[in-house]
Structure formats: C-alpha cells, structure tokens
Image (cartoon, rainbow, N blue to C red):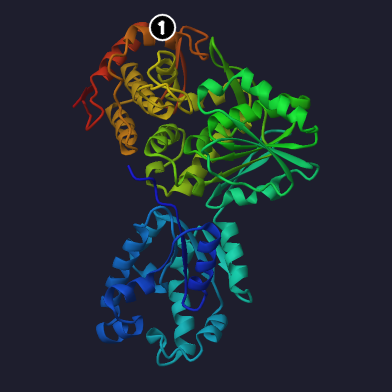
Amino acid sequence: MRPPADHVLVVGMMGTGKSTAGQIVAARLGRLFVDTDAEVERSTGRSVADLLSSLGEPAFRAEESVALGRALDARPGAVVAVAGGAVLDPANRSLLRQSGTVVWLRARSETILDRVGDAADRVLLQPDPAEAVPRLVAERRRLYEELADAVVDVDGLSPSEVAARVLAVVVRRVRVGVPGRSYEVAVGPGARHELASVIPGRARRAVVVTQDGVGVDVDPGIDTVHVVVGDGERDKSLATVERVCRELARTGVTRHDVVVAVGGGVVTDVAGFVASCYHRGLDLVNVSTTLLGQVDAAIGGKTGVNLPEGKNLVGAFWQPVAVLCDTDALVTLPEREWRSGFGEMAKYAFLGVEDLDRLPLSAAVERCVAAKAAVVADDEREGARRVLLNYGHTLAHALEAAGFADGDEPTPGVHATMRHGEAVGAGLVFAALLARRLGRIDDARVRRHVELVESYGLSTALPAGVDRDELVVLMGRDKKATDGLTFVLDGPDGVEAVPGVERAAVVASLAEHAALAGRAATVVDGETRR
C-alpha cells in the first residue's frame, strides 16, 4: 500500500498569492511545489487565458482536473497551489479532501482587485473586473469554507507573512488533558521545527537521545548534548538506561534541563524512563519519527525497558511536556515500517475514529492521537479504560513472546516473521473472530476488520509454523489476564475488556484464524472463507 497522501493544498481566489506563498512554504519544508495552472500550460503548450478564450470554460476545467490529478499523484507530499476555480467540480473537492491539508487564502474583493490590476489576462474577469470579482467571491465562498481545514486571511500581509501563517496552520494540535501535566501534541509537516518553542524556559541544556540512522535533525535552540542509543529491542535495557544516565552525569545535566527523544518507540521508551528517574525527574519532549510512534508510543507517558524475563517490566508513567509528530519525518521510512505503523493505526478504526482508512496522513495521525489522548486523560495509569488501547495486542504480544514477531523496532541480526504492528493487524482479525464466536459481533463486523487490515497491506494470517497451544498459554500470561483468559473485544457497546473467556473458544478461533490466507478473505454465514 502507498502511504496516505499528505499534501499542503493552497486554495483561494486569483490574486490571493497562492503561487508566491506556496513556493515559500515548499522551500521551508523542502518539498516539491506544483502550480496546477502552470501544469495545465505545460501539458497543453498554451496559456490559461488562451485556453479559456479558445476552448471555453468547460473544456478548460476538464484540463484543470487532469492537471490536479497529476499534481496530487506526486509522492511524497508536495505543496500545491490549486487553481481558483478547481473547487467548482465536486470530484475535485472530494479528491482534495482525501489528499492532504487544505488551506484557504481568503481575501476581500478590494484586495483581489488591487492585486490583479486591469486583469487583462484574466478572461473570467472581463469585461468588468469590479463586477466579476465580488460575484466570483460570493459564488465560491461556501465551497472554500466547506473544503478548508484552515483559513489564512491575506489582506495586508506580505507573501512571507502569508507563508509563515500557512506553515503554522498546517500543523494540527491535540491537547492531552492529563490532570496536572496537560500538554500538546503537534501533528503535521514541519512540526519538528517547533522544538525550540516548546523547550521549557528554565532549561539551559537539552539532551537529545536518538539512534544512528534516524536522520532527523532538530534544533532545541539551547546548548545541546547528543546521546546515541542502540537499535532494536535488545538495547531497550537497564544497561542502556545506566549508560545514558552516566553520560548525563558526566556532562553536568541538572534537574532543570530537558531530555529530547528523537526517534521511534525504543528511543521514546528509553529516553522517557531516563527522564523519569534522573535527578528524580527531568522535563521530556518527544519528537517521534515513526508512524507507530506517532500514533501510539510517543503519546501517553508510558516509558520502560525490558528484562530477560519479559518486555517493559521496568518503567514509569512520565508525561512529556510536548510531543512533535512531524509527518515529513516519515517520508524515508521503509515499506515494512509503514506497515507496522498501519497495524497500530488500524485499531483506532474500532475505537471511534471513523473513515480512518480514507483520511490523508496528517489527519489520520491527528485523529489517532486525539483518540488516545481522550483515553489517557481519563485513565493515565491503565486502571480501566486505557486497557482498550491494547485492542489486537493480546495475540500480538503472544506472537512476540513466541519469537514470531519483534517489538516496536527490529533488533539487528534477529529476523522475526512479523513486526509489532503487523502482529497487531493479525491480532485485530483474531479478536474479531473470537468476538463473533462469543456472539458479540456479526459477520459484517468481522468482514470490516478483515477488509481494513488488508487495506493497509497487512496479512490477516498467522505465521507458518506457529504452535496454537503455545499461543493460548502465552495469552493466558497477558497483563490483562486477572480472571482467566482476558481479551479486549468488540461488541454491541463497542470495544471492552472481556475476562473469563473459555479456552475452547480461543482454540477454535485460532484454528479458524489459521485458515486465513491473508488475502481476499470473506465472511459468510458465520464462517471465514477464502
């Protein structure tokens, strides 16, 4: 599966500065800039004015739609200046909604008239621009309002000022309302560049904890110490925590300084635990660079490291002061990393995020973050509701314990069959099969689980060679299992924890799951067929 689109789409009337401001935004983000009017002229070899005059507006709009489609097919995300009239076509509006963050550059008619001058090359404004501009503004205002994710009023602003406001509004904000430690998560292209603004004022030094190969540069705006930790679950250990803490001691880090975690789940877990215990607690900022981290690991304050006896057995709840989820940092992720992130993301489709698989990337991450933030604010320490975030994880953790899946990040030299998120995808399908066997959901709901998981390019099948009896034993050791086999399952009242599940139902559901080929599975009359 291709990653979801994450374009910055600048819309608005002619004369609002879409092209000029868009080029500045693209340069700041290091992105391709596309002007759809310029695309039309390039592909036809004729000017927009000539096309409108000779072909008429309907034929021109058809060319415009083709150019828009080409622009939005660019990967990774581009900054696109969308021709003013492109929004008149319902199909174009639908495409724009699915393709990224839409920013409307809004201007008064007087501003537009002042900027277009005599409008000699603006065919649609002839013969009387003073009459045409207010009319077109009135005709298109509702369409822009319905389409836009954000609005920038450009009256009286320079192109640089407009660009700065566009850069600010394309980053979405989610508040994590933990009592006493509330903080904001910034999601969107370029979010990491806000780091200096979220560093606590008392900090004189930042400790940037990262890994080789992350490849994401950050600027805390203060004196910085860099500490590199190893790759993979093997380095998520007390030995790593000790090494990092000793480096902090050696460089004279004080309790007023700040830890900045830059990386995926291993980095945020290790750096977060260091922040929780060094000097009895340092401020923490997470700059998440993986999809799995952005929708889960970096949010909510769970930190921890592994012991030989099990995963995440030593840790603490330690909320960051801010989280930055820069979707541009995901551009270089390998396909397998995308799939792992999609597996973790998919659970939110059953935790209240509607149409998740049809959202552009920044919007999808924002909705997942908002869903998790609501749960964490209500149950920070996993007393009850937070366990719902483990939907699909009971089987996933068993697969990891059995050696068929690795953790949040692979350990070099260790080749498990599945990544964590891929195991969660399979776990979601298993949970649906079990819920149906218990009479909690119907065939259609199982089908939705299967189709969603497959839509993200994930297999629904169990790995070859898995011992189902061993999985049952391992699932019985899950941390949720306080009353026999316990699962988070879908049902008539939504997803909830279900204790005391009979072993026979689990075994039968695993057998049914084993029959899945992972492709084109259908659910008919209570049976899964392929």
Left or right? Give the position of 182 relative to 368.
right
Q: Is residue 76 above or below residue 436?
A: below
Q: Is residue 373 above or below residue 28?
A: above
Residue reaching furthest to the left? 530
Q: Residue at x 50, y 7 (%)?
A: 483
Is any atom of residue 164 visible in this view?
yes
Q: How many residues crowd around disc 1 within 10 Å: few (fewer than 14), some, or many (20 or more)?
A: few
Residue 152 figure quarter: bottom right
Q: Residue at x 40, y 90 (%)?
A: 126
Q: Which residue is mark 1?
A: 473
Left or right? Give the position of 209 relative to 458.
right
Given residues 436 and 455, the one toward you in this image is 455
Residue 318 in the image: x percent, y percent?
A: 67, 28
Q: Residue at x 27, y 71 (%)?
A: 62
Q: Residue at x 54, y 36 (%)?
A: 212
Residue 385 figure quarter: top right
Residue 522 in the image: x percent, y percent?
A: 22, 30
Residue 2 in the image: x percent, y percent?
A: 34, 45
Left or right? Give the position of 170 relative to 146.
right
Residue 444 figure quarter: top left
Given residues 488 and 199, the one toward you in this image is 199
Residue 217 in the image: x percent, y percent?
A: 59, 46
Locate the C terminus by quadrant. Answer: top left
Q: Is residue 462 above or below residue 89?
A: above
Is any atom of residue 525 visible in this view?
no
- What kind of residue is marked 1? Val
Instruction: Give the tally of numbered discs.
Output: 1
Q: Secondary structure at mark 1?
A: helix
Locate the N terminus by quadrant. Answer: top left
